[in-house]
Amino acid sequence: MALDLSLIMFLQAIWFILPAYAANGLPVLFGGGSPIDFGKTLNGKRIFGDGKTIRGFVGGVISGTLVGLTLFYVGPILHQLIPESQGLIDLSYSPIVGLLISVGALTGDLVGSFIKRRLNLKRGAPAPVLDQITFLVFAFLFALLIIRPIPLEYVIFLIPLTLGLHLFTNFISWLIGIKKVPY
Ligand code: CTP
Ligand code: MG
């Protein structure tokens, strides 16, 4: 099976960012307890708000790091099982990258909430693009600390993919009745 170069890049990009998706998506399961800003305000507005908790942050970092660790071990196994995957999986992946990407994603999530509170948006109010992309940008920025350069193709693939995935999961959530609006 000859794989198209852009398809390989696309799969590599997803591989690369999976820890960030886990770190950003799973805190909803761990949330609760003390908010990171301990209820403090800045000019009368919450710093981050009640949607950003210590448990959510730590749980997100741990999940993302575990996903990164799994990829680190699964990559070489895939290479052995599927020789065609050579070049498909970036073996430069290391557990520390997963940790950095996860901390980056959660930091970006905080930055997003910080901006939302400055704009008077209540916790949970939708902020299109900001809600979906800040975590990604910061995941890249943190990864850049040890991976340089990050292929520009990764960014070009992942921004629309992430926006699309969010629209898709929101639509599904609306279909099954856990969201009031389909977007
Ligand atoms: N969550 C958490 N801690 C974090 C991030 C998320 O506890 N650091 C949990 C919270 O229960 C939060 C849920 O995951 O409500 C969904 O996360 P998100 O959509 O990022 O937060 P919002 O509630 O929408 O808050 P905001 O308006 O600040 O984005
Ligand atoms: Mg939200």
Image (cartoon, rainbow, N blue to C red):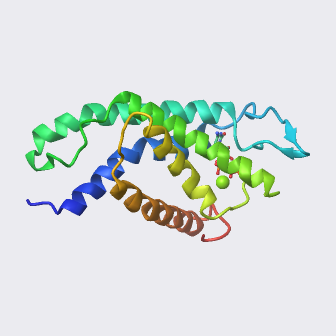
Q: Nearer the viewer, residue 72 or 142?
A: 142
Residue 148 shows up from this direction: yes
Q: Position of residue 2 (x, y in %)?
A: 9, 60
Q: Nearer the viewer, residue 152 or 60?
A: 152
Residue 122 shows up from this direction: no
Residue visible at 45% across and 65% down in the picture: 160
Residue visible at 19% across and 60% down in the picture: 5
Is residue 145 rendered to the left or right of residue 30?
left
* Number of dots carrying numbers: 0
Q: Position of residue 45 (x, y in %)?
A: 86, 47
Query: Which image quadrant is residue 147 in?
Result: top left
Q: Nearer the viewer, residue 116 or 69?
A: 116
Quarter of the figure that contains the N terminus: bottom left
Q: Residue furthest right?
A: 44
Quarter of the figure that contains the C terminus: bottom right
Q: Position of residue 146 (x, y in %)?
A: 39, 33
Q: Position of residue 121 (x, y in %)?
A: 78, 58
Residue visible at 53% across and 67% down in the picture: 167
> On screen, 35 above or below 15?
above
Is residue 101 rendered to the left or right of residue 88?
right
Q: Nearer the viewer, residue 159 or 68?
A: 159
